[in-house]
Image (cartoon, rainbow, N blue to C red):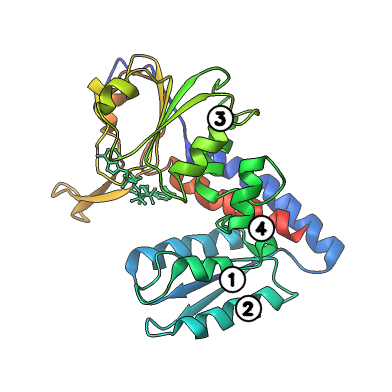
Amino acid sequence: MDTETTYQLLDGKRCSEALKQSIAEGAAAVKSKRGRPPHLAAILVGNDGASKTYVEAKVKACEQVGFRSSLIRLPETITEEELLSRVEALNADAELDGFIVQLPLPTHLNADRVVQAIDPRKDVDGFHPVNVGNMVLGLPGFLPATPSGICELLRFYHIETDGKRCVVLGRSNIVGTPMSILMSRNAYPGNCTVTLAHSRTKDLASITREADIVIVAIGKPQFLKADMVKEGVVVVDVGIHRVQDTTRKSGFRLVGDVAFNEVATKCKAITPVPGGVGPMTITSLLLNTLKASR
Ligand code: NAP
């Protein structure tokens, strides 16, 4: 047991439970005003196990806060035209406030075309170019769920960001790139000096060691090591991986992109995996749906 633990655990479960209480109150208010609660739909194409787990967690979260949810399961073999017509039908459905198309899609489907077909006013994942553009310009719209959930978590724990050096590791469209924009905007959380690092970044450790805040979304198990960060850093771990663990009944355990045990000893604050960013992503989706219903 670590007796020298001084870091603060940024507990995404605790934060999301607190947020869900106010979301449930918001849902009840929408229901009494409009005669129906907020309604979220999710399209799941094919049988990918991880995607199924994520979608089911989203549906369950809707139930917890009193939303209506619809899970639309479509076969792996669906054509792009058929999928686009399902998206159009959801765009036109007045009983539906927001919907998501669970990614990744099977390779014969063009995810960009599908996302761009979603009405931006119902795009509660915040992936449509209109919502991305609004985020960049600081205009109202839907923020992408994972980066926005990380902002909520930093806010919940009053993590200081103003004037800090933030390194975002990974430049995906759904996590790293929007995260870098949100951390550099003139807001709280924000006002950081941000470096966005990726696979072509040279001497990465020298860059991460300068950071007051490191947000890791690269999809490599336990990549960030203790010698890559400075004392007193705040670390947010977006990654989620199953690794073999014969000591567990299940035969595996979940780890992030950060080597938690060694990195945590140098941290002021750090997110755990599981129970850090994951629950916050789902809660952000609920917040966006509540916003759409209003
Ligand atoms: P992604 O699309 O695979 O992007 C990975 C990024 O990391 C890319 O920009 C890549 O650079 C960069 N990268 C890869 N290897 C690198 C290296 N050695 N050094 C520096 N940069 C490197 O990943 P993602 O969709 O953002 O997801 C990242 C992780 O977060 C995954 O484990 C995913 O499962 C997890 N995730 C979790 C949640 C949640 O709710 N907890 C949500 C979304 C994602 P290039 O661009 O140069 O290739």
At x 24% / y 36%, what residue is drawn? 223
User: In the figure, is residue 255 to the left or right of 51?
Assistant: left
- Tag 1 residue: 117
Mark 3 surroundings: few (<14), some (14-19) or many (≥20) residues within 10 A: many
At x 47% / y 35%, what residue is drawn? 11
Q: Quadrant of the C terminus?
A: bottom right
| Disc 2 + disc 1, Cβ < 8 Å | yes
Residue 163 in percent (x, y) is at 55, 17
The front one of 162 and 28 is 162
User: In the figure, is residue 21 to the left or right of 226?
Assistant: right
- Tag 4 residue: 289
Amino acid type assigned to the residue bearing label 2 in the image: Glu
Residue 94 in percent (x, y) is at 75, 75
Give the mark, 1 or 4, whose residue is nearer the N terminus. 1
The front one of 73 and 171 is 171
- Tag 3 residue: 184
* Label 4 residue near ligand 1, CB within 8 Å: no
Give the mark, 2 or 3, whose residue is nearer the N terminus. 2
The front one of 105 and 193 is 193
At x 48% / y 27%, what residue is drawn? 194
- Tag 2 residue: 88
Amino acid type assigned to the residue bearing label 1 in the image: Ala
Give the mark, 3 or 1, whose residue is nearer the N terminus. 1
Amino acid type assigned to the residue bearing label 3 in the image: Ser
